[in-house]
Amino acid sequence: MAVAIGVGLVVRRQRLLRDDGTQDVVVAESGGRGLVLDPYPGEGVHGGGERPVRRGRIVDPESCGRLLGRIADAALGPDRSDSVIVLSHPVLAGAEHRSAARALLAGLGTTRVVVLSSARAAAAYAGPRETGPLLVVDMGAELTEVTLLVNGLVADARQAESGLDDLGGLDPAAMPAALVRTVLDMITSMWRHDRHGAIRGALRKGPVLAGGGALCPDVTDRIARCLGTRVRLADDPSTTVVRGAGQILSSVLRHRTASPEHTGRPR
């Protein structure tokens, strides 16, 4: 789950997969007045605390609400009027999770909440500018998702409730193969159910790879080789979703600034 608040604060947990093993981090960006968090939200500075979000879903609303309140206090201050929050969620998070997230964000007193899938956020940052079908592969700490977008809308998606955290017990040399196998199984399932050639068109364009798993060259090279196509990577794939959420937030804020009620121009 990624959250972008007000003037551009974005926070997301990632487990980064590197050739020499894994490392837990929180990636964050801030623009204007913002905040950067280092430990995983909910675990505290020294770790060992509760985790309010697991496998992309809110499991402890009270703790999650306190966390979001602290972030909003730091990024926005006490006056939340005319502020915007952008929340990205796993594509298949479900209506219950989205409703819980909206309820928590509504309690922060902001003017507007924008909710979108992590695949749309990743596409906004690392995808091609042209429209049409696009495949987004998000290999995160606790979830792996493959999403087919067509003209920006979710046409199909698969999710494995496993991620880099679950591969931590494997030999480091075996981790890339296990992750790639999960991804390819989901793409193959989508291919079999594709009646209009969208998956084929998306593969010709090249899938967007996001999440900590895309930091491992062995993973990205295997996916490209097995699919017979190039892959699209941001300069730091682990921040693709959070940067995309930040871009969407910036776009929303620019639109609000240019709208008649903010510029004083006649409607």
Image: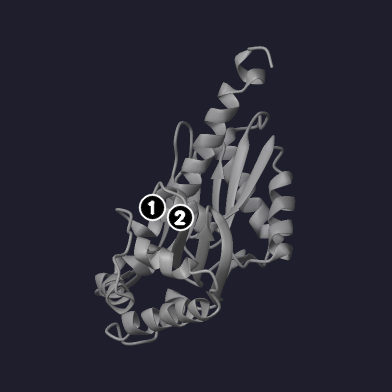
User: In which quadrant will I find the N terminus?
Assistant: bottom right
Left or right: 260 as drawn, with respect to 149: right
Task: Say which quarter of the image contains residue 203.
Answer: bottom left
Q: In the structure shown, which secondary structural element does the residue marked by tag 2 occupy?
A: helix
Picture residue at 49% right of the left edge, 60% below the top: 40
Is residue 14 among the parts visible in the rendering?
yes
Residue 143's place in the image compared with 113, above or below, is below
Measured as percent of width and height from the top left, residue 128 is found at 38, 51
Q: Find numbered disc 1 in the image and state the secondary structure of the residue it sits on.
A: helix
Which of 129 and 201 lies nearest the eye of the viewer? 201
Q: Residue at x 68, y 66 (%)?
A: 94
Point out which mark residue 126 bears: 1
Residue at point 25%, 70% (across, down): 217
| Residue 192: image tag | none
Asked if the residue at tag 2 contacts the one at tag 1, i.e. Cβ–Cβ closer than 8 Å, the answer is yes
Relative height, residue 111 to residue 219 (above, below)? above
Amino acid under label 2? Ala
- Determine whether, in the image, residue 2 is placed left or right of residue 16: right
In the rendered structure, the answer to whether residue 185 lies left or right of residue 261 reads left
Residue at numbered disc 2: 122
Pinpoint residue 259: horizontal percent, then vertical percent: 61, 23
Q: How is the image coloured?
A: one colour
Q: Pointer 1: residues within 10 angstroms few (<14), some, or many (20+)?
A: many
